[in-house]
Amino acid sequence: MKKGYKQLVDEATAEIKTYSVAEAQAKLADANVQFIDVRDIRELEREGIIPGAYHAPRGMIEFWVDPDSPYFKPVFGEKKEFILFCAAGWRSALTTKTVQDMGLENVAHIDGGFTAWKAAGGPVAIKESKK
């Protein structure tokens, strides 16, 4: 390996804004902030969700963020701050760096991800399965 995941995450983290769980929790009720959950749908159903977070799986994020893509999601065209998270903060660090490189402004991620959010007593809702 020329670069392992740790190096990639470290490099991304050096170039993005990172919020602590407490800082992110303080922004949860802010109408100018949109939380973005990049976890897999099975994780949401198994672990729960942050209320009000928009689910944008990491595998589709480049297509959903780009206004020229046929898969563009209008939420990413809003003038808000986007706070991304995953389970541990690794995928969200990489994703935040990617969308920042694509030109999405005002993006950050949560240090420690959803696991740290839950451990700190952050609000969690149940994600109903579509079975």
Image (spheres, rainbow, N blue to C red):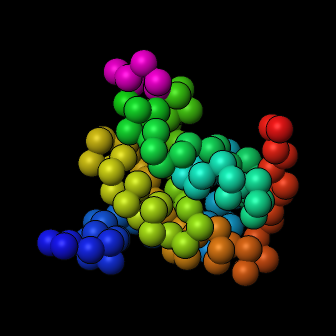
Figure disc tally: 0
- Residue 50 x/y as whole percent: 73, 57
Residue 10 % position (x, y): 31, 76
In the rendered image, the residue lying farthest to the bottom is 119
Q: Residue at x 30, y 41 (%)?
A: 103
Compared to residue 126, the image places residue 6 above or below, namely below
Q: Is residue 94 left or right of residue 45?
A: left
Residue placed at 80% from the left, 65% from the top? 123
Q: Is residue 70 magenta?
A: yes
**In this view of the protein, which residue sits in the foreground, 51 or 56?**
56
Provide the residue span drawn in magenta: 67-72
Residue 114 seen: yes
Give the percent coordinates (x, y) of residue 22: 64, 76
Q: Residue at x 62, y 44 (%)?
A: 55
Q: Is residue 6 above or below residue 79?
A: below
Magenta stretch, main secondary structure, is loop
**Does residue 62 show up magenta in the picture?**
no
Q: Is residue 67 shown above or below 59?
A: above
Out of 62 and 35, give the one closest to the viewer. Answer: 62
Q: Quadrant of the C terminus?
A: top right
Left or right of 67, for residue 110: right
Quarter-wise, where is residue 116 in the image? bottom right
Q: Quadrant of residue 1?
A: bottom left
* Residue 14 seen by the camera: no
* Left or right relative to 40: residue 124: right
Q: Where residue 64 appears, x then y in whole percent?
A: 46, 33
| Above or below: residue 25 compared with residue 130 | below
> Which of 45/72 is in front?
45
**Corner quadrant of residue 121:** bottom right
